[in-house]
Image (spheres, coloured by chain):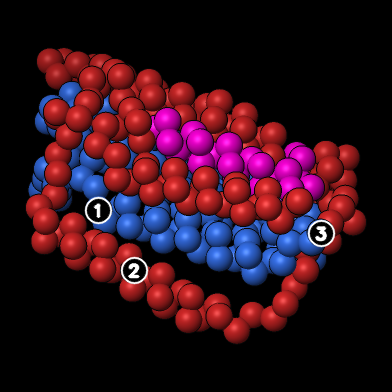
Chain colours: A blue, B red
C-alpha cells in the first residue's frame, strides 16, 4: 500500500492554515507561539515527504536545522514573554504593542 | 492498512490542532499540541524517516513543550485570566484563514500523482542521514551549535534580574 505525496501536501496545508488561523484568532502570546510551532511542523512534514519521495537526504537535514532554529526561537521568545509579564502583568498581545514607544 | 493509519493520524493531528486554537484553557492547548506532535511523529515513521521522527519527539515533546508548560505554570495563566478578542476580530480571523486555505488549495490543485514508495527509501535512516550531515552539511551543522549557544546566552541575559538602581560601568 502506497501513500500519494499529495495527501501529505493537503495534510501540511491544513496544519499550516490552522496555525495561521490561531495566530490571527488568539490574543494570548503563548498560544500564538504554539501556533507558530504548528506552522513550522507543517513545513517539516512536507519537507520529509518530498525528501522521501525524491530519495534525497538534504530535505531531512534541513528539517533538523529547522528544529534547532525553533528550539532557539522558543527559548529566547519565552524569556522575553516572562520578562514582559514581569513588567505589564499580562501576555495579551494587544497590550504588548506598547513596545513600539 | 498503511493508508488507514495515515487517515487516522491525519484526522487526529488536524483535530487536535484545531483544539489548540479553540480550547479556552492554555494548559489544555499545550496538551493538545503534544497530541499533534505525536501524530506527526507517526507520520514520520510512516515515511521511514526514523532519525527525524525521534529527534522530533526529543526536541518538541521533550524540550519545547516542557518549556511552554513551565512558563504557563510560572505565569499562572488559566481560563479566567485569558484575554479574548471581540467577535468582529474573531470573525475576520476565521475568514482570512479560510481565504488563505482556498488560495493554497487552488494553487496546489493540479499536482500530478506522485506515489510514495512503501519501504524503498532508506534515506531517513540514522546511518545515511548522519553521513550526509557530517560531510555535505558539516559547516551548517557546526554553525547550528553556535546558534544554540547564542540563544542560550540570550535567554539567560533577558531572564536575568535587572538591577535598576546602579549598573556598574
Residue B98 disc label: 2
Secondary element under disc 3, as helix, strand or loop, is loop
Q: Does B40 appear in magenta?
A: yes
SS assignment at label 2: helix
Q: Position of residue A22 (x, y in %)?
A: 32, 51
Check whether the beta carbons of the residues at disc 3 and disc 1 lie within 8 A of each other.
Answer: no
Magenta-highlighted residues: B30-51
Residue A43 falls left or right of residue A100: right
Q: Which of A46 and B129 lies nearest the eye of the viewer?
A: A46
Give neighbour class at mark 1: few <14, some 14-19, many 20+ (Cα, 10 Å).
many
For the residues labelled 3 and 1, the Cα–Cα distance comes to 39 Å
User: Is residue B141 visible in the rendered structure shown here?
Assistant: no
The residue mark sitting in front, 2 or 3, is 3
The residue pinned by badge 1 equals A25
Residue drawn at point x = 88 percent, y = 40 percent: B127
> Dominant secondary structure of the magenta stretch?
helix
Percent across and percent down for residue A42 are 53, 54
> Mark 3 — on which chain does it sit?
A
Quote the CA–CA distance across marks 2 and 3: 32 Å
Amino acid at each position: 500500500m502506497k501513500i500519494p505525496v499529495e495527501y501529505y501536501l493537503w495534510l501540511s496545508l491544513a496544519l499550516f492554515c490552522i496555525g495561521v488561523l490561531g495566530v490571527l484568532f488568539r490574543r494570548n502570546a503563548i498560544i500564538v507561539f504554539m501556533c507558530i510551532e504548528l506552522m513550522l511542523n507543517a513545513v517539516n512534514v512536507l519537507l520529509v515527504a518530498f525528501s522521501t519521495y525524491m530519495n534525497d537526504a538534504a530535505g531531512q537535514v534541513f528539517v533538523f536545522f529547522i528544529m534547532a532554529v525553533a528550539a532557539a526561537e522558543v527559548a529566547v521568545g519565552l524569556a522575553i514573554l516572562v520578562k514582559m509579564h514581569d513588567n505589564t502583568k499580562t501576555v495579551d498581545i494587544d497590550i504588548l504593542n506598547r513596545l513600539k514607544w | 492498512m498503511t493508508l488507514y493509519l495515515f487517515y487516522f493520524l491525519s484526522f487526529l493531528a488536524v483535530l487536535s490542532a484545531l483544539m489548540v486554537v479553540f480550547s479556552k484553557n492554555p494548559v489544555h492547548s499545550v496538551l493538545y499540541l503534544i497530541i499533534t506532535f505525536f501524530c506527526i511523529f507517526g507520520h514520520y515513521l510512516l515515511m521511514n524517516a526514523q532519525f527525524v521522527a525521534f529527534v522530533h519527539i526529543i526536541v518538541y515533546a521533550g524540550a519545547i513543550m516542557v518549556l511552554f508548560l513551565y512558563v504557563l505554570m510560572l505565569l499562572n495563566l488559566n481560563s479566567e485570566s485569558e484575554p479574548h478578542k471581540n467577535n468582529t476580530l474573531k470573525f475576520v480571523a476565521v475568514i482570512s484563514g479560510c481565504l488563505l486555505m482556498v488560495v493554497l488549495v487552488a494553487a496546489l490543485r493540479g499536482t500530478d500523482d506522485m506515489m510514495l514508495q512503501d519501504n524503498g527509501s532508506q534515506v531517513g535512516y540514522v546511518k545515511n542521514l548522519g553521513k550526509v550531515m557530517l560531510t555535505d552539511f558539516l559547516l551548517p551543522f557546526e554553525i547550528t551549535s553556535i546558534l544554540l549557544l547564542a540563544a542560550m546566552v540570550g535567554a539567560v541575559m533577558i531572564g536575568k534580574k535587572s538591577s535598576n538602581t546602579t549598573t556598574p560601568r
